[in-house]
Amino acid sequence: MPTTSLPRGVAIIGAGMSKFGAFPEKNSRDLFVEAYKDLLASVEKGFDPRQIESFYLGNFSSDLFEHQAHMAPLLADAVGLTPIPAARVENACASGATALRQGVMAIASGMADAVLVGGAEKMTNLPTADVTDTLAAAADMAFEISAGFTFPGFYAAIATAYMAKYGMKPEHLMNVALKNHENGALNPNAQFGVTIQKWMEGRVAAALKKGKPAPTWQTVMDFLHDDSANPMVAWPLRLFDCSPITDGASALLLVPADRAKDYTDTPIYITGSGQASDSALHDRADLTALPAAQRAAAQAYQMAGVTARDIRIAEVHDCFTIAEVVATEDLGFFAPGEGYRAAEDGVTARDGAKPINTSGGLKSKGHPVGASGVAQAVEVFKQMRGQAGARQVSGDVPLALTHNVGATGSTCLVHIYERKD
Amino acid sequence: MTPDQPSRPFTAASFNQYLAEGKLMASRCEGCGAVHLPPRAICPACHSANLQWQEESDSATLAAFTVIYVAPSAQIALGYGREKPYLSGIVQTPGGQKISARIEGFDPLQPESIHVGAPLQRVSDSPALTYRAVTEA
Ligand SMILES: [Zn+2]
């Protein structure tokens, strides 16, 4: 068995998630209970929940989204786990992976022998302007939001800097959205589990049904360039460049590596974990990369003893299409300035050399902020065990990676997963 | 600044007070000479807390930008949004510092005509940090 530089090996023995979407009748608690039940059902030799010793929850802003704070004990109680220690971890959109890292540290240090890691966010109660305001609170209110910025706006600014430096066009970003919806269409838990082609055909059919003139789109690119079908959010980013507003929850069960086979024949080992912080976007020398992601990746690769080339698949933080391009460069999959061609060339497709976001990514699967980082691990857990259904990549997946970003990279985490059999 | 005039604290409130007085002020580290914009209370380069305020030039260039159509509620209250998009950006001062700012003087409906590197001039009577495109005569 390969060695790890963690003081004690860590394994995932179960992973689950709720369906992602807009659920007016469900709150974070209801969604988390669904994820937890899905998780327990995934442990094939069974697991007695009374063995769970600690719970870490990734959640960005239940306070503002649901007017409900102090979420960790509430969810621990909902699944019958009180009085174990329960703590909520907040790191904006990277809350989920931050909770996972707390769980890894708890197991690796010997403090606990079974840890539940969760993520949850309920976002669709609020109107869009209030969601925009709530997400903006992840940036520097005094010196960034005061300039009128929104989160799509920050990533749009990264896109303009990237276009100016490398010659990318907005069409290249559209290829990222097309690819991620192709994957999401095969994920039954995805919020928008439909290809953009099917989406366009649905719009045409709906127009005809209402007796309106049918739109004249010939191709998906026509559709994506149409301001009425794909409205501008923050130039150059349009609606289909942005992840949606989503309700959802996700969960993982961690145990020490040397006990994992008591519960499953195919545990997935976490062999690398990296995390870094950074200043506001405007304080960085280069606006076309996230240094914290580069640093987190370097830590994780070193801990796992692997390189970018060894990674078979990755779930990366595609909150916006440009974010996936930058992520694949920061992770070392492509050289700076070359990542934007990958989706167009098919390299990052499910059957490409480096499949990215086989789940559909945040873009198509949905982005319930605090749940996303944990849901990325749920996807690689399934892919590595050959349980990803219609979207299963072909061939072996011995090594995978997840990349979770808070704000514009003020927090970045990278985790590396191995199957050892 | 004379010794009997104590320096204003290195806070967002002081920065905004200077802006209201028409001045763009950075902090300069007495330990290593680094200039910070926005101002800081501790120098991240050398960790010194011995700082001075320093007035910045009103000229800058556009480092990155966007035209925002889905606006936050503060901008909606000012009449911005889908029908009236607006620009936000990151500007770079001649000293190399960068800061987020409102951008005016470009046509928001012609974003392809707006270029990174474009020269800007600060609007000195704006309560929010704002730069305007420099149009060549
Ligand atoms: Zn200094």
Image (cartoon, coloured by chain):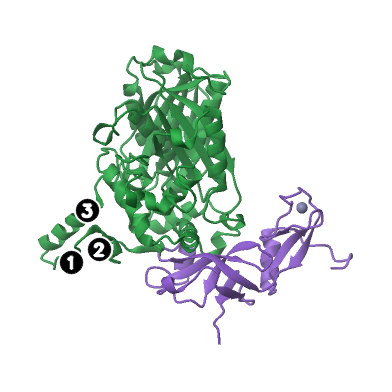
Where residue A350 appears, as percent x and y from the top left, is 30, 40
The residue under the point 10% across, 65% down is A211
Depth check, front residue: A225 or A79: A225
Where residue A150 appears, as percent x and y from the top left, is 47, 59
Spatial CA span between label 1 and label 3: 14 Å
Position above or below: B59 against B98? below
- How many residues crowd mark 3 within 10 Å: few (<14), some (14–19), many (20+)? some
Q: Is there CB contact under 8 Å for labels 1 and 2?
A: yes
Q: Which chain is drawn using green?
A: A
Chain letter for mark 3, please. A
- Badge 1 is on which residue? A216
Q: Which mark is residue A421?
A: none
Question: Type of residue at label 2?
Answer: Asp
Q: Is residue A242 left or right of residue B94?
A: left
- How many residues crowd mark 2 within 10 Å: few (<14), some (14–19), many (20+)? few
Question: Type of residue at label 3?
Answer: Gln
Where residue B11 appears, as percent x and y from the top left, is 70, 58
Q: Which chain is drawn using purple?
A: B
Earlier sequence position, callout 3 versus callout 2: 3
- Image quadrant where residue B52 sits: bottom right
Question: Type of residue at label 1?
Answer: Thr
Whether discs 3 and 2 lie on one chain: the answer is: yes
Where residue A237 appears, as percent x and y from the top left, is 39, 60
Q: Which mark is residue A222?
A: 2
Chain letter for mark 2, please. A
- Badge 3 is on which residue? A197
Position above or below: A295 against B34? above
The residue under the point 66% across, 63% down is B96
Tell me the quadrant of the picture where the C terminus of chain B can be found: bottom right
Depth check, front residue: A333 or A287: A333
